[in-house]
Image (cartoon, rainbow, N blue to C red):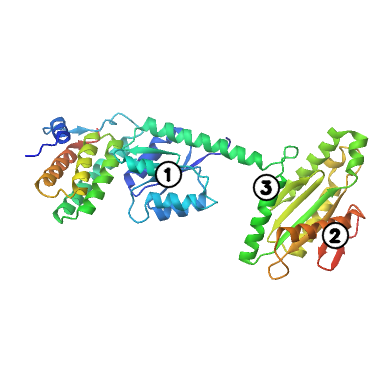
Amino acid sequence: MSHKQTVLIVDDSQAIRDLIPARLKGLGVHILAADSGAAGLEMVRLHEPDLVLLDVNMPGMSGFEVCQALKNDPQTHDIPIIFLTGSDELLDKVKGFDLGAVDYVTKPFDPVELCARVRAALRTKALMDMLTNQAQLDGLTGLHNRRYFDERLEQELDAGRRYNRSVGLLMLDVDHFKKINDEFGHPRGDEVLRRLANILVTFCRSSDVACRYGGEEFAILLAESGSEHTFQCGRRLLQAIRDSRDLHSVIGRPVTVSIGAASVQPGEGRMLPSVLVDSADRALYAAKNKRDCIIADTGMTSITSAAG
Amino acid sequence: MIRDPQRDLVASSGAGQAPLVSTLADDPDMAELVQVFVQELPQRIAAIQEALAEEDLERLTSLAHQLKGAAGGYGFSPITEIARLIEHQARDRMAGEMLRQTVDELADLCRRASAC
């Protein structure tokens, strides 16, 4: 694991909030603390820590209530929780596991035991993160895969409906890809896809989602992007691909792509994944007739960019 | 008189006026924190005695619970043990002489607590 993991302590006792960081110093983790259940809940949502050390017995919102809230929220569901409990409260320990905690530490705690339990929980979390990450990535290009794209598309459209925001989509297909494979062999074809993926990664904002949609087809999901913005993004991307020596050097001549652009906005048609994908696909199909160009599917009208 | 074996044990181990030195006295990582903890003990005891005087057993339970969880971590296991006793007695609503005595013992231990 390359990044520093974060541990959040939620305990109403200042003495405990002081003690734990001193005891975990050797682990090289980043430590946050909250002094109540409600504050802890807020910090989890804000910082998405890798582990929560959660006191059971707190005035106001108890540790159990915090745990339940975290486990009921898909955003925080997978964050492991270790309960801090009194050594003589057997029922609390059992209840903690029932609520989804991974472990417990009894107070007052032995520092060696505390470190060991925290380390074990963090190790598991890092492996889970890695697996989740790999399950969402395309093996060849390192971009997100189709499965992840489908999930995110739905989330973005949900958010779009809720916050009244448009969502844009670019679909991109490599021109004459079969010919490249036939002429230069598959390893060279794969290299074309990898270098194209690099261009997409550089091009995307952090809120955009670039993925390999399948074969030589790519998709870029643009959050908060109306038809005009989506089209302009696609144009810039097309130009970046035309200008990439890195890409063209793979086969010693230009590699070109066709791009279809589409967007949906609240109040204008249905904000459904199939509507947006079909629309971008339609535009891509039209672009494929011409190649090395971008076409936007804006309801009835299509805008074609001047090629070159 | 009802005898409490756990309490006899604690009472006998901490008898006298000798200082109760934290078992972490030699841990440089902890020295400062232990010092702060010791400095704050009088406040904690005052709060516990106040809760007892007001017969606010719920508050007494909660204060004893906090002290129980913290003291051992700062190298004061005997304080944790007495605090545990108070927590249980207060939770079981065993107010009266026995609880008062236990709180006195705790106050005595805390007065003698020393960081080094």
Q: Determine the secondary structure under disc 1.
A: helix
Residue A281 visible to the viewer: yes
Q: Determine the secondary structure under disc 3.
A: helix
* Residue that label 3 marks: A148
Q: Determine the secondary structure under disc 2.
A: strand
Residue A206 visible to the viewer: no
Residue A295's disc number: 2
Query: Mark 2 or mark 3, which has the lower sequence index?
Result: 3
Instruction: Answer with left or right where residue A188 lies relative to residue A225.
Output: right
Q: Residue A143 sits in which quadrant? A: top right
Same chain letter for marks 2 and 3: yes
The quadrant of the rendering that contains the N terminus of chain A is: top right
Distance from the alpha carbon under mark 2 to that under mark 3 = 25 Å
Viewer-nearest residue: B52 or B2: B2
* Residue that label 1 marks: A98
- 1 vs 3, front mark: 1
